[in-house]
Amino acid sequence: MPLLTPSTRIPAARIGAALAAVLLAVLLGPPSRGEAAPRPAPSADPGAARWAVQPSGPGGPTGRNYFTYDLAPGATITDHVGVTNLGDRPLTFAVYGTDAYTTTDGAFALLPSDRAATDVGAWIGVERRNWTVQPGRRADIPFRLTVPRDATPGDHTGGVIAAVAQDGVTADGQRVRLDQRIAARVYLRVAGEVRPAVTVETVRVDYDTPLNPIGRADLTVTYRIRNSGNVRVGGTGAVVVDGPGGWTLSRTSPVDLPELLPGAEFTVTERVTGVPPALRLTATVDLAPTTVDTALPPVRRTASVWAPPWLLIAAPAAAGAWLHLRRRRRPTSAAPSTTPGPAPVSEPPATVAPAGPASVSEPSAAPGGPADASRAPVAGTPEPPAGGTAAGAR
């Protein structure tokens, strides 16, 4: 390839072609290395089984969402279930009745195919079990519901199932039998005494007390409710958190409870945020249950947990301990000894004894004048004669 010198001239057409090639390479990215471009996966398998199940009548669907009945013990009723084949090949359905139950997460479910029905599902009878429906067609299949004479009053729930069994292969190559089921619900209320009741069986409160006495923490309330009556119930539930003296600290918004069939139970977990450590926290579960007909009286249950503000408690305790230690270390004055010892000897008062026996007489006042101490007679001294002086006086 020749070198370019300042005197070399490149035609403008070649420059434009080169720039166009560079721009095209940038837009399209690096060239392929022989790998085929991936093809989009098909949106659906044209041979997959697709069907629908709905309440129907002899002439077709009746607009009902569920099968709903109010019957007395011993009564019998005939109805129809519509099964529509939405696929492009004939399908054979197993049509039968089964019982319903509430799962632990509150969902409506039907018994698996390997469990026999013992309630309303056992009271449903279909003329035959297997029905073949052509593509794009619907079969309105009749069935009969017979209520036993000893059936208990209240709600009995189940479903009418249309199932398709197919052979399949798992990811590791094992062949399995797939049982795909679609059902229409059946709600039957047997006449008699209706006893709606909801029970809050347990309440557990968990609180992680913060070290900061003015801080906040989450309070977790877990409670289990049970439908202890004989009709299905729903409603709403909320949690109220109170401190000492009934002081309301927080309240959750009401949440919808799932539909609970008779005998079903459900566990609810509520997280209450921003709760202060108010020494003693009381959580009250407040339920507002309802039936399909009316509202029921509220149901409440409480549980408490300690939430001490540790720093507020530790500060006075530390101050008291410090004062106690300080008093113990303060020096005290020596107390007088109480040990018995020799009794002290007291000295008698000093006195001057006279050289000899002498008596001092008190001077007496002369009549008509004061007493003169100079004239007081002294024992052993002769009295001077009257009108004279003592010897040597002139």
Image: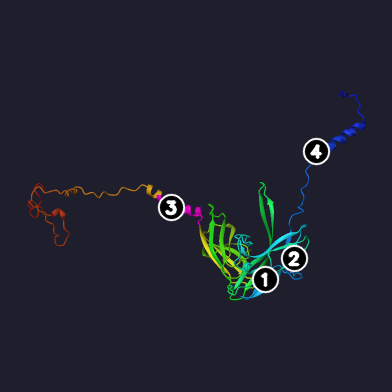
Q: CA distance from mark 4 to mark 2?
A: 57 Å
| Residue 139, numbered label | 2
Quarter-wise, where is residue 362 in the image? bottom left
- Classify residue 237 as left or right of residue 89: left
> Which residues are drawn in magenta?
307-324
Q: Where does the image place residue 26, in percent across and percent down from the top left? A: 82, 37
Say whether residue 332 is left or right of residue 194.
left
Rendered location of residue 264, percent (x, y): 58, 65
Label 4 sits on residue: 29
Mark 2 and 3 residues: CB-CB less than 8 Å, in contact? Answer: no
Task: Identify the amino acid type marked 2.
Answer: Ala
Which of the 4 image quarters holds residue 12? top right
* Badge 1 element: strand
Which circle, 4 or 2, is nearer the viewer?
A: 2
Q: Which residue is mark 1?
A: 144
Spot occupied by residue 118 in the image (x, y as percentages of width and height):
59, 66
Q: Which amino acid is tagged 4?
A: Gly
Answer whether residue 165 is visible to the viewer in this image: yes
Of 327 and 343, which appears nearest the observer?
Answer: 327
Q: CA distance from mark 4 to mark 1?
A: 68 Å
- Sequence-first tag of 4 and 2: 4
First in sequence: mark 1 vs mark 2 = 2
Residue occupied by mark 3? 320
Looking at the image, which residue is at 66% across and 52% down?
176
Where's the N terminus, which quadrant? top right
The Cα atoms of the two marked residues, 2 and 3, are separated by: 87 Å
